[in-house]
Image: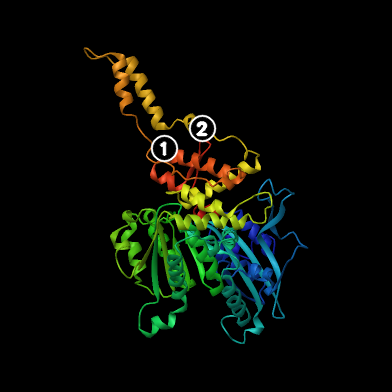
Amino acid sequence: MGDYGDSSNDAPNTVYGRYKAFSSAQRSDTEINVLEFIRSIHPDQHVTAVNRRHADLVTFANAGNAEAHLIRDTDEVISTRLYAPPVTRMEGGDGKLGENVSFGLYKYTWKGKELQVYYICWQTNCGQFQQYFILTPKDQLSGQEHSPVADELIKAAGTWSSQPHEEIYVFDGGSWQKNHKLWEAVQGSSWDDVILDPAMKDTLIKDVEGFFDSRHIYEEYSVPWKRGIILHGTPGCGKTISIKALMNSLQKRNVASMYVKSFEAQDGQQHSILNIFRVARNMAPCMLIFEDLDSLVVDKVRSYFLNEVDGLENNDGILMIGSTNHLERLDPGIAKRPSRFDRKYHYKLPGERERLLYCDYWRKKLQKNSSVDFHEDISQVIAQLTEGFSFAYLKELFVQTLLALVGGRADADDEEDDTYVTVTDAAVEETKAVEGSARVLKEGESLESTEEKTEEKPSQPANRMPEVEIPDHLKENSLMRILHKQTKVLWREMDNTDADEIHGRAKIGGGIVKRDKIEDSL
């Protein structure tokens, strides 16, 4: 114990004075010293310490479960004033003020009982340590080692703190955090927004929701109540929005959603995997999400990950969902081994039927907008014109079209096809120029003959937009015209973009629009 734990020291005879003096001295075990400070200042009180991570007493009270009033009529408070600007500049306003308390004494009222609770936090080599110290009269212990009142409060606050409240658990940097922003983003996702083959969509929903409804069946047949699902296929075809819709729908069943962003951490990836599954077991029933599974499970952690998946400990109530754009890159022990990831759903490029449904989805969204004449026949035309488009590309088509409408470019003349030069065409022209001006001609060969040979084998775009006759009654429709124009633009970009870029992200104005991921909502 350090010198400042001794009540005979010259430090002021208050908890705050002792703490302040100690914090300025040579370091020793802070928790022991703080505990001794409190005991010496409050000799008639029993002190129960609990980490904020296990039972967040103040947040529990602020949620309406108790009353916690910080005693401010003394200088024995350490707090930092916080300022949070508006989320975006467009939101406007002056932002909000807040407070971060690192030392304080609370008058705490719970179930008619008045308690004193210190909240003290300090820095350690592993980060910030946050601790509550609950004071209860010693004469109420009745010979018991622990305070019944403090224990009851810790149990109630701990139970409440362990549950998500308008939050989704996100694992990043080696630890789990409750994320309200992601929860808000997920609230806007529903199965109405997911355009898939109806049979596959129905099967996926029943597969996931049925798992959480079937615990008794698993137990009846002595089968471990766990399951794994892989969503794989072309980027931009609905995997992420499907996961978000599942997260939203499972909230009504009291199923926690837990999203893993990365295994990277100061303590190493193996420690992260251990922590991920340890908390998931405590939170079960839960859906444990590994997006881009092929990037997460690298060779050095493969065995460790598989051991946790196989459930050397009990994994009951855990449904794992892994997504990947490259099923072939997944370790066979994950992709092909039953009882790990049992079912695979293939997200292909949408067929004409799905493209039609997606266009109708946008038509319904725009029904209330009287300035947009979205004739029902437009959906059929666009569905035919966009063969080979992913949902990401279809979304980009409608977004750019709406921007053009808002910007007053709907009635602009269509671009002529010959005004656009593809990268392939430009490469041909560059080759002709170089060969014509710099290459040494062979004997008997003329410059003219060289150009003729070059022109005999021009490179052609890999993809061509389907030729679709636009009905007469749509030819003057502003929305149809701009959709047609923007479809041409996207087709031209597809001629000069590799497969991953075509289906995962769109090049607009020289930039790249990144494909949707759950983490983009954070």
Q: Position of residue 386 (x, y in %)?
A: 46, 48
Contact (Cβ within 8 Å) of mark 1 with mark 2: no
Residue situated furthest front in the rendering:
472
* Quarter occupied by residue 267: bottom left
As measured in the structure, the alpha-carbon distance from the residue carrying label 1 to the one carrying label 2 is 18 Å
Q: Position of residue 438 (x, y in %)?
A: 32, 15
- The residue type indicated by label 1 comes to Asn
The vertical placement of 172 against 162, above or below, is above
The earlier-in-sequence mark between 1 and 2 is: 2
Residue situated furthest right in the rendering:
73
Q: Between residue 331 and residue 392, name the one nearer to us.
A: 392
Q: Residue at x 58, y 85 (%)?
A: 144
Q: Which residue is mark 1?
A: 496
**Horizontal side, residue 473 vs residue 269: left or right:** right
Q: Which residue is mark 2?
A: 416
* Quarter occupied by residue 46: bottom right
Task: Pick the quarter of the image with the C terminus.
Answer: bottom right
The vertical placement of 91 against 304, above or below, is above
Q: Between residue 12 and residue 159, name the one nearer to us.
A: 159
**Horizontal side, residue 434 vs residue 98: left or right:** left
**Horizontal side, residue 175 vs residue 455: left or right:** right
Q: Nearer the viewer, mark 1 or mark 2?
A: 2
- The residue type indicated by label 2 comes to Glu
**Helix, strand or loop for disc 2:** loop
Q: Residue at x 41, y 37 (%)?
A: 496
Q: Between residue 285 and residue 217, name the one nearer to us.
A: 217
Q: Specify whether residue 515 is in view.
A: no
**Horizontal side, residue 210 vs residue 154: left or right:** left
Q: Residue at x 33, y 66 (%)?
A: 307
* Quarter occupied by residue 321: bottom left
Callout 1 crowding tier (Cα within 10 Å): few <14, some 14–19, many ≥20: some
